[in-house]
Amino acid sequence: MSLETTFERRSLPLEHAFTIARGTQTTAENVVVRITDEDGTVGVGGAAPSTHYGETADTVEAVLPDLLSVVEAVGDPHALARIERRMRETVNRNPAARCAVSIALHDLAAKQADLPLYRYWGLDAAEAVPTSFTIGIDDLPVVREKTEAAVDAGYDVLKVKVGTDRDEEILEAVRDAAPDATVRVDANEAWSPREAVRKIDALAEYDLEFVEQPVPAENPEGMRFVRERAALPIAADESCITLADVPRVVGQADVVNVKLMKCGGLREAKRMVHAARAHGLEVMLGCMIESNASIAAAAHLAPLLDYADLDGSLLLAEDPYDGVPMPAGAIDLARVERAGTAARR
């Protein structure tokens, strides 16, 4: 079997500027991989690199020729373990770049098997959890407007970005607009440990589900301090990047946030999910701001999760790729009629 590979860079404008504690984003730089077999079947996968983890679209483009040469040399999209091992030997870091290749390979393998990816894995569509919709940091009237729009669209799980000197006002605006929604918050490493405990105690009155990454990942004892004292459960995002990090965050968090772009691909993400379960942790699958060239594949993992935060493509002004239907946040895998991940132009 022979495979042909290509990739292209896509600059995707966001519908609104998106602000977290670390900064503001107005476009998403994605790199999309295509792997084509002898019959013309195409697997599609996307990279959404994050500078926070040392990657850019430029670095992804720089290493993809070496990664794709591995794919062409092996020549079989079902030889996922062999390709993954050789890709790691070739490019040890650059997880978003490896992830794009992983997704494209899984998409092609499932298409060749004539199955949606979740069925290729043997998962149950009925077990898929809904995705949250994220409300970024903004002026209070805008926060209220975005929350009202999300509620009107049917989203009943909201993730609110915090890490400012007006977090209580932000949550008050959200709760006024969405009194019945399930709300979780994400501080993106914004607080010191003692500050985090104080902040979380104050925010708990807004009936929150959990708090994500309250302190910097470089301070694991600070995470443990917060988890032991805070009024709400704690989720680890920046503290939990790859499989090796899962046992390290035991005692520091109640939930791990797995992201394809952090860990390097779908196989590693599944390993992280099962490792987290073995360590008594709940699991959320998150995302960057990314197109359905990658979100579509992530959605097929939804039956394995406790929580999903897969709204990255929903924040784009327009997504050039198809994805898994998510009406009002419901990840509706049962409506995926095509084989593969449903990502195509």
Image: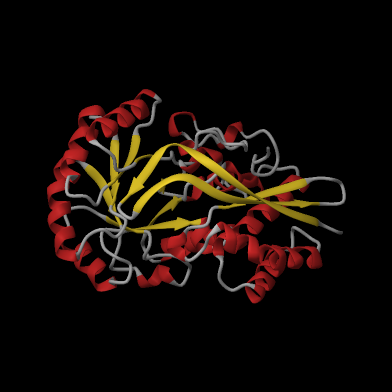
In the displayed structure, would residue 81 be above or below residue 6? Answer: below
Q: Specify whether 200 is left or right of 66.
A: left
Colour theme: secondary structure
Q: Specify whether 155 is left or right of 338.
A: left
The quadrant of the rendering that contains the N terminus is: bottom right
Residue 301 seen in the current view: no
Residue 320 rendering spot, x and y as whole percentages? 61, 36
Q: What residue is rendered at 59% in x and 74% in y? A: 92
Q: Nearer the viewer, residue 216 or 331?
A: 216
Residue 345 rendering spot, x and y as whole percentages? 68, 37
Residue 257 seen in the current view: yes
Q: How many marks?
A: 0
User: Seen from this angle, which residue lies furthest bottom?
Assistant: 89
User: Seen from this angle, which residue lies furthest top?
Assistant: 152
Q: Nearer the viewer, residue 87 or 82?
A: 87
Q: What residue is rendered at 13% in x and 52% in y? A: 201
Q: What residue is rendered at 39% in x and 66% in y? A: 279
Q: Specify whether 117 is left or right of 129.
A: right
Q: Specify whether 287 is left or right of 345.
A: left
Residue 41 rendering spot, x and y as whole percentages? 80, 45
Residue 316 rendering spot, x and y as whole percentages? 49, 37
Q: What residue is rendered at 70% in x and 55% in y? A: 105
In the displayed structure, would residue 227 be above or below residue 123? Answer: below
